[in-house]
Amino acid sequence: MSATADHAETNLAVRLGFQPDQVVQEIGYDEDVDQELREAIEAATGTELVDEDYDDVADAVVLWFREDDGDLTDALVDAIAYMEEGGSILLLTPKTGRDGYVEPSDIGEAATTAGLSQTKSISAGKDWVGSRLITPKAAAKKR
C-alpha cells in the first residue's frame, strides 16, 4: 500500500467538498495559482474546471483571490451568481507572508456580508489557504 502525491492531492480536493461529476467554475486564475490543486479538483470531479466565461450555473466555484484583486465581498457576491443553489465556494487566498495575503478577519467579514458561512479553512498547497464557504440554505440541508 503506497500513498502517492497524486492520491494525497485528490484526497485534499475531496476533503474540500468536491464530488464526482460536479461542474466547478474557476474565477481569478493567474500564473500564481496552484496547478496541483487544480488538477486534484479535476481528478476528484472527473471534469475540467470551467472558466469565468461559462454561461450556465456551476455546482461549486473556486475563487483565487489576492489582496490587490479588488473588493472581496463583491467577488463573493459575483461568485454566488454563478452557482447552483446549495453550492459552495472554495476561496483560495495566499498564505501568511506571501504576496497578496488576505487577513482572516477580512475573509470572515466579506463572507458574512455576502450571506455565506465559513465551514472550514485548510492548507491548500504550498502558497495557498482555502476557506470553504456555503450559503446558509446549503448549511441547513447539508447534503
Image (cartoon, rainbow, N blue to C red):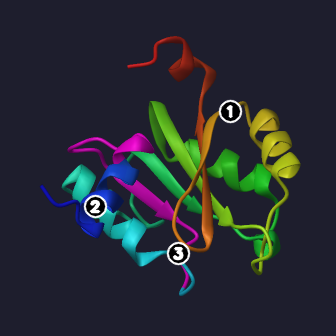
Q: Which residues are magenta?
A: 14-30
Please give the name of the residue rendered at 48% of the width and 42% of the height, measured from the top-left corner: 83
* Rendered-image quadrant of the C terminus: top left
Residue marked by disc 3 = 29
Quarter of the figure with residue 102: bottom right
Instruction: Give the prevailing secondary structure in the magenta stretch.
Output: loop
The location of residue 128, given as percent across then percent down, is 61, 67
Name the residue tied to disc 1: 116
Residues under numbered marks 2 and 3 in contact, where contact means CB atoms less than 8 Å apart: no
Q: Earlier in the sequence, mark 1 or mark 3?
A: 3
Seen in the image, is 71 located left or right of residue 125?
A: right
Q: Earlier in the sequence, mark 2 or mark 1?
A: 2
Q: Is residue 15 above or below residue 72?
A: above
| Quadrant in which residue 3 is drawn | bottom left
| Residue carrying label 2 | 42
- Is 39 left or right of 105, judged from the image as shown? left
User: Marks 1 and 3, how far apart in space?
Assistant: 22 Å
- The label number, if any, that marks residue 90 in the structure image: none
Query: Mark 2 or mark 3, which has the lower sequence index?
Result: 3
Amino acid type shown at disc 3? Tyr
